[in-house]
Image (tube, grey):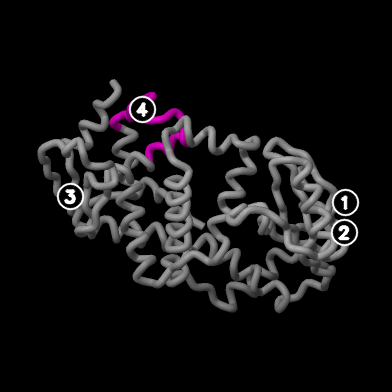
Amino acid sequence: MFHAHAAARFALIAVLLWACSPARSNRTDAEIVVAEVDGAPVSLKDVKNEILSMRGYTPSLEARGPSRGEVSEAVRRAIERTVVLREGRRRGVTLPAGALEEEVMRFRADFPPGGLEKALLQAGMEPDAWREQLRGSLLYRRSADAIAAAGATVSPQEVEEAFRKERTSSTVPERVRVRQYLFDSAERAGVALEDLRVGRPVGGNAGDPSVEGVDLGFFRRDELPPEIPAGVFDLPEGGVSEPVPGEGGTSLFQVTGREAARTQTLRSEEARIRETILASRREAVFHRWLAQATAGAKVRMNTELLQKLVEEKR
């Protein structure tokens, strides 16, 4: 997975600057073009959203205007995003069903009930606009993954060598796969608990991320995070924990899969080792690709509008 801004290697060789008269006041931020990347527009809204994202959505731009450095970084990120998403579309990258809702739930878990909406309100961002930006970030990451995967390889010999170097035990411990359901009240969690225990789908409103929950992946007993009760490891497949209160609401944890302890062999560990080696190589491949793609792009920036954004609320 790759960060939404690929770093210090960013350089634009073919950058053209142009200045024009200030945008008409009756146009929305989404309609005001502040840059173009090979003819693809980057809007004032795109740049402002990048700034809010960099700030963690607080304070709002209305409360404190952006600095020159913030605007420069936001434009760089918006240009990179445009280049990567365009390549993702070319490769047919899409979001799987439920991916956006799972990501929304992950964000909600970091806030008390209603806290995410309050933070967005303070930042001057509508929830629907934030969700759309989050959707774009997920597409960016999937596009980056697709770009990197196409250029990263590992040989069977490298996998075998890594296996022999890391092998410290002949036994791989038992693991369980855990799914988390998050609710804004203990009462809702209690109702959902009864549903899950009898095999019924969790009730809720359409689009409610708690209905599907979030797959947390596999854990050994000694790998369980502190927010997951230790007793979850001993639940049978399909078993559900008692409600667990936390800062972000009340959670239920369900065991959705179990892997028995097994003997460690090259065959059993091959896929995991291959993925571990590929992860670092994909990162390097992506950074090289992005540097080349942005350096070769024809970028035009409206310096007058960007300067005006810096001067606002100062």
User: Is mark 4 in CB contact (under 8 Å) with mark 3?
Assistant: no
Question: What amino acid is at disc 4?
Answer: Glu
Q: CA separation, marks 1 and 3? A: 58 Å
Residue stretch in magenta: 50-68
Depth check, mark 4 against mark 1: the one in front is 4
Gap in Å between the C-alphas at discs 4 and 2? 50 Å
Q: Which residue matches tag 2?
A: 235
Question: Residue 177's x, y, as percent?
Answer: 75, 62
Whichever of labels 4 and 2 marks the residue nearer the N terminus, that label is 4
Whichever of callouts 2 and 3 sits on the residue coming sooner in the sequence is 2
Total marks in image: 4
Q: Main secondary structure of the magenta part?
A: loop
Find the residue positioned furthest to the top.
Answer: 314
**Label 4: element kind:** loop
Name the residue: 46% across, 35% down.
Answer: 57
Residue drawn at point x = 10 percent, y = 38 percent:
21
In the rendered image, residue 260 lying in the magenta stretch gets the answer: no
Disc 3: which residue: 300
